[in-house]
Amino acid sequence: MEPRLIYSATDFLKSKLLWKKTNNEEWIHFGTGNDIDYNIVNKSISEYLSGEDIYLVYDRTNSGIFKEEQFQKLFKSILGNKNFYLWNKELTKAIEFNYVGILRFGKL
C-alpha cells in the first residue's frame, strides 16, 4: 500500500480506537532525548504487536509496513521527537507515541 493511503486509512481509524488503561492511566511515560527508556518502549511493542508486521505511520510520505526488526532502527530517530503510530497489519491495534515521551495502546 502506498504511504499516503496508509496514512489516510489510519488517520480515519485512529478516532475509532478504544484506549487501554493501565493502573487507571491511559498514557505510559517512556521519556525523551537521552532519557528514553527503551526497555519500556521495546516491551510495549513486543507485548502488544508481537510477531506481527508493523505499519509505522507518521506522515503522508514516510509511512509503511515493516518487519519488527526493520522498524526498530527507523523509529528510533523519531521517538520522543514526533507524534506517530505503530499499527498491526490488520489495522485493528495501534500504539500511539507522542513527542513528549508518552505512549498508549488502542484497539478497534
Image: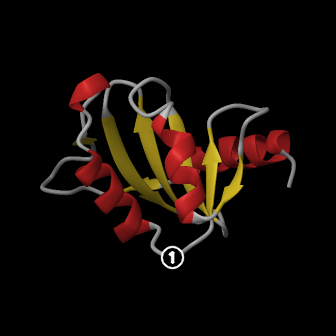
- Report how many numbered discs are placed on residues in the image: 1
Task: List x then y, in percent, for residue 18.
Answer: 44, 56
Relative to 31, 63 lies left or right: right
Compared to residue 47, the image places residue 94 above or below, namely above
Q: Which residue is mark 1?
A: 51
Between 58 and 105, the one nearer to me in the picture: 58
The colour scheme used here is secondary structure
Task: List x then y, in percent, for residue 61.
Answer: 79, 32
Q: Amino acid at mark 1?
A: Gly
Q: Quadrant of residue 57?
A: top right
Between 58 and 92, the one nearer to me in the picture: 58
Disc 1: CA contacts within 10 A as few (<14), some (14-19) or many (>=20): few
Residue at image coords 33%, 24%: 100
Between 28 and 64, the one nearer to me in the picture: 64
Q: Quadrant of the N terminus?
A: bottom right
Between 16 and 52, the one nearer to me in the picture: 52
Relative to 53, 103 lies left or right: left
Compared to residue 13, the image places residue 68 above or below, namely below
Residue at image coords 68%, 48%: 10
Residue at image coords 25%, 55%: 21
Disc 1 element: loop
Q: Quadrant of the C terminus?
A: bottom right
Relative to 82, 41 lies left or right: left
